[in-house]
Structures are given as structure tokens and as C-alpha cells.
Amino acid sequence: MKSLVALAATAALAGCALKSDVRRVESELVALRRATARADSARAVALERVLDEIAETQRLFVDSLAAQQRRLLAFQGQTRADLTEVQRQLVQIQELTGQSQQRLSELRAQLETRARQVPAPQPGAPVDSAAAATGPGPEELYDLAVRQLRGGSLQTARMAFTKFLQDFPQHDRVPDAWFQVGETWAGTNGDSAAAAYDRVAKDYPDSPRAPAALYKLGLLAEQRGDMPAARVYYNRVVAGYPRSEEAQLARTKLQARDR
């Protein structure tokens, strides 16, 4: 009888222990589920954040690509416009060149016609065979070039002065012609103008055009911002040609720089 009671008590105790273990396991499972849920939630949040960052990066990339495409299209459009403008200017230059050459040919023809209309010399009078062979004389050609320059036909004037220099390289007006070539370039091509003025100053220092050529070189240097070179040219005018009008102008320039 005592054994049965002890056995029953043992069984009861075992049952209580089993229930306690089950409850503990259930509690642990609940805690594990909660922890897993929290971990899953954190991973979901992190994953969503990563996806958002990827989406933002992709959006920025697309926006940057679109901006690059717009700039490229704008550049291509500007390039086409520039090319069109260059082509238009080339056509104008070709037309102006043709017109200038035609005009010079017409003027030369007029001079030659006028030369043929000069009365024949009387018998026994000396004949200038060189003048008869060449047609327009140096003075006529030079005056023609000056008229074209004053009339604003710069290219025609330049061609006429160049023709004068080629045909009459020893004439007294050669320094004047070189100076006038510089004048035809002065408003459009400073380098070409400077080359012509420099030719006068170097090769014909005794010419009345020399101080003007040096002064013009000073002005061109000043226009391109080279003040030391401008000062050198102005000083050369003052030192070499102190009584010239250009010397007074050069002194004024130098005094203004020294203030």
C-alpha cells in the first residue's frame, strides 16, 4: 500500500514537472517568434532603405543623363548654327573678293583706255617707251588706290597699292603705299596692319611716313593690351622725330600713362 502511494506521488510530481517544461518551451517559442519578427522587420526596413537608395541613385543618374543629352543637343545645335554662319560669311567673302577683282579690272581697263587716248607725240619728240608699254603710270595707279581707300573700298584699294608696289618698287611713293596698305588693314586685321607699318618704319626711316607708322604701331600695341611695347613705339617717335605731329601725340600718350 505504501508503495502504491509513493508511486502515485512520483507520477504526480512528474506530471507537474512535464507541464512546467511545456510552458517554458512555449514561452521560449513565443520569445523566439517575437525576436524573429523583430529581426525580420529590421531586415525589411534595411532592405527598403537600400532599395530607396538604389532608386534615388538611379533617378539621379537618369536626370544627369537627360541633362547631358540636353547639353549635347544644344551644343550640336549651336555648332550647326556656327557652321552655317561661317559658310555664309565665306560666301560673302567670295562674293566681295570677286566684286573687288572685277572692280579693279574695270578701273585698270579705264586707265588703259585713258592712256591710249593720250595724243601721239609730235615727230622728233622724245618717247617714253617704258610708260607706253606699261599703260597706267605710277601716279595714276597710286591716286586710283587712294580714291578707293577714301571711298571705303578697302580690298580694292589694297589690291591697287599692292599692284603699285609690284610694278614700281623704286618709286618715291613706295613708303606711302606701304603705309596705306597698313591703313586698309587697320580696322580688320591688326597683325597685317602692323606688318605694313613696320615695313615703313624699318625700311624707310627717312620717309615722312615713318613717324606716323611708328605711332600707329604704338596704337595697335595699346589696343591689344601690350603697354610696354606701346611705350617703346611712342618713345621712338619722340626720340627719332621730335618735331613731327606724331611726336606731340606720342608725348600726350606717354604723359597720360605716367599719371
Image (cartoon, rainbow, N blue to C red):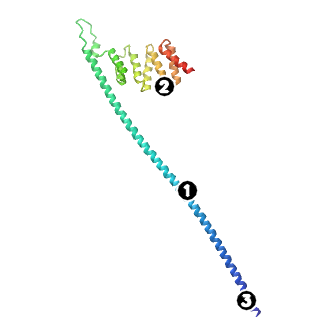
Residue 150 lies in quadrant: top left
Residue 235 visible to the viewer: no
Mark 2 or mark 3, which is nearer the start of the sequence?
3
The disc at residue 223 is 2
Residue type, numbered disc 1: Glu
| Residue at image coords 46%, 20% | 216
Q: In which quadrant of the rendered image does the C terminus lie?
A: top right
Residue type, numbered disc 3: Ala
- Counting from the top left corner in percent of width and height, residue 251 is at 52, 16
Q: Which residue bears the numbered disc 3?
A: 8
The disc at residue 53 is 1
Residue type, numbered disc 2: Gln
Q: CA distance from mark 3 to mark 1?
A: 67 Å
Residue 92 lies in quadrant: top left
Callout 1 secondary element: helix
| Residue at image coords 47%, 50% | 65
